[in-house]
Image (tube, rainbow, N blue to C red):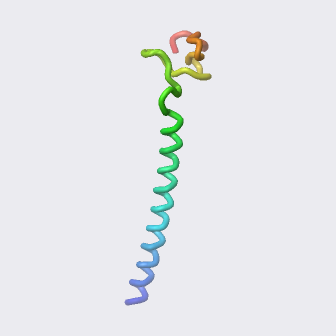
């Protein structure tokens, strides 16, 4: 019976380690995305799509490109 409990504890410890690794990866991913959408990034005039090199977006000069209505 003790052997089974020991095996269960070992598995639980491994799962805890995996959860911690996953938490670190998710935190890094969140940080990466928060840096990408920080102040002044991908912002355009109010009511318009974000600036940048995307269809229907606007270059920093404010000139639209891409199909109309996007």
Residue at the image point whose x is 59% and y is 12% from the top: 61
Residue at the front extreme? Answer: 39
- Vertically, is 9 above or below 51? below
- Vertically, is 46 above or below 15? above
**Residue 26's x, y, as percent?**
48, 51
**Residue 44's x, y, as percent?**
50, 18
Residue at the image point whose x is 51% and y is 39% from the top: 33
- Vertically, is 55 above or below 29? above
Q: Quadrant of residue 1?
A: bottom left
Front-most of residues 62 and 53: 62
Q: Please state if 11 lies on the left or on the right of 66 as rendered.
A: left
Front-most of residues 22 and 24: 24
The mark total stands at: 0
Front-most of residues 55 and 25: 25
Q: Please state if 35 lies on the left or on the right of 46 as rendered.
A: right
Residue at the image point whose x is 51% and y is 46% from the top: 29
**Residue 69's x, y, as percent?**
51, 11
Residue at the image point whose x is 42% and y is 84% from the top: 6
């Amino acid at each position: 019976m003790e052997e089974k409990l020991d095996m269960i504890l070992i598995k639980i410890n491994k799962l805890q380690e995996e959860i911690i690794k996953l938490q670190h990866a998710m935190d890094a991913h969140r940080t990466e995305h928060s840096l990408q959408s920080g102040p002044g990034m991908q912002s355009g005039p109010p009511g318009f799509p974000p600036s940048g090199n995307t269809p229907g977006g606007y270059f920093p000069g404010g000139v639209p490109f891409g199909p109309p209505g996007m």
